[in-house]
Image (cartoon, rainbow, N blue to C red):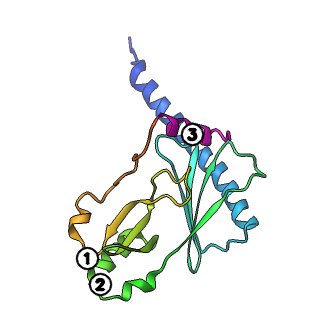
């Protein structure tokens, strides 16, 4: 008499399984990251981790200390004793006192939620927001950050959001990305 459609409930079931799997993956990655921070003697004051593009098996982590940020990547397939490698990025917020309109800087710092670095460029200064990740940082630790805002150069900021996230992705890069996810050299 009462017939239940399997399609919608199957779809919801798949979504619930994916979210549960992502939650477990984040717990596993976070534990490895925390052990690595302790082993590296990094006394972070704040940290966050977020999945890399298209998966919840490789995680991007940013740990903040008093001078800057330690950035790394952690796969859920890494063994508990394996350490996450961190690359340090100095915040350099003292550079922001160089005659830049404070309202513009204040909005960017608020948008970055405190996770930003200041970089000198050929056009002055730029603010990189770390919350959005790096362009291939899992392969090149000093890769540029996805979100860069060039101060005092409006023409450089027209397409600022997600600029270059997939720049340089080729078949070999994709294969290397998958190998990194599954923890293969």
Q: Which residues are magenta?
A: 171-185
Question: Which residue: 30% across, 88% down?
Answer: 99
Secondary structure category for the residue under label 1: loop
Q: CA distance from mark 1 to mark 3?
A: 37 Å
Name the residue beneath numbered marker 2.
100
Q: Residues within 10 Å of mark 1 (few under 14, many from 20)?
A: some
Percent of width and height locating residue 146:
40, 57
Name the residue beneath numbered marker 3.
176
Mark before the other along the chain sequence, 2 or 1: 2
Secondary structure category for the residue under label 2: loop
Mark before the other along the chain sequence, 1 or 3: 1
Is disc 1 in contact with disc 3, using a CB cutoff of under 8 Å?
no
Question: Which residue: 69% across, 65% down?
Answer: 37
Name the residue beneath numbered marker 1.
152
Is disc 2 in contact with disc 1, using a CB cutoff of under 8 Å?
yes
- When the figure is inspected, residue 81 is found, relative to residue 122, above or below; the finding is above
**Residue 34 found in image quarter:** bottom right
Percent of width and height locating residue 161:
31, 57
């Amino acid at each position: 008499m009462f017939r239940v459609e399997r399609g919608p409930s199957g779809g919801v079931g798949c979504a619930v399984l994916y979210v549960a799997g992502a939650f477990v993956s984040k717990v596993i990655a976070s534990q490895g990251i925390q052990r690595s921070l302790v082993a590296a003697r990094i006394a972070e004051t704040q940290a966050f981790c977020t999945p890399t593009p298209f998966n919840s098996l490789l995680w991007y982590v940013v740990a903040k200390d008093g001078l800057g940020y330690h950035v790394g990547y952690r796969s859920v397939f890494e063994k508990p004793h394996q350490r996450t490698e961190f690359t340090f990025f100095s915040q350099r917020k003292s550079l922001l006192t160089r005659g830049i309109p404070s309202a513009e800087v204040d909005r960017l710092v608020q948008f970055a939620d405190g996770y930003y670095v200041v970089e000198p460029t050929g056009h002055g200064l730029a603010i990189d927001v770390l919350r959005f990740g790096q362009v291939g940082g899992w392969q090149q630790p000093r890769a540029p950050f996805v979100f860069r805002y060039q101060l005092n150069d409006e023409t450089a900021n027209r397409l600022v959001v997600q600029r270059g996230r997939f720049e340089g992705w080729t078949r070999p890069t994709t294969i290397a990305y998958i190998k990194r996810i599954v923890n293969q050299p």
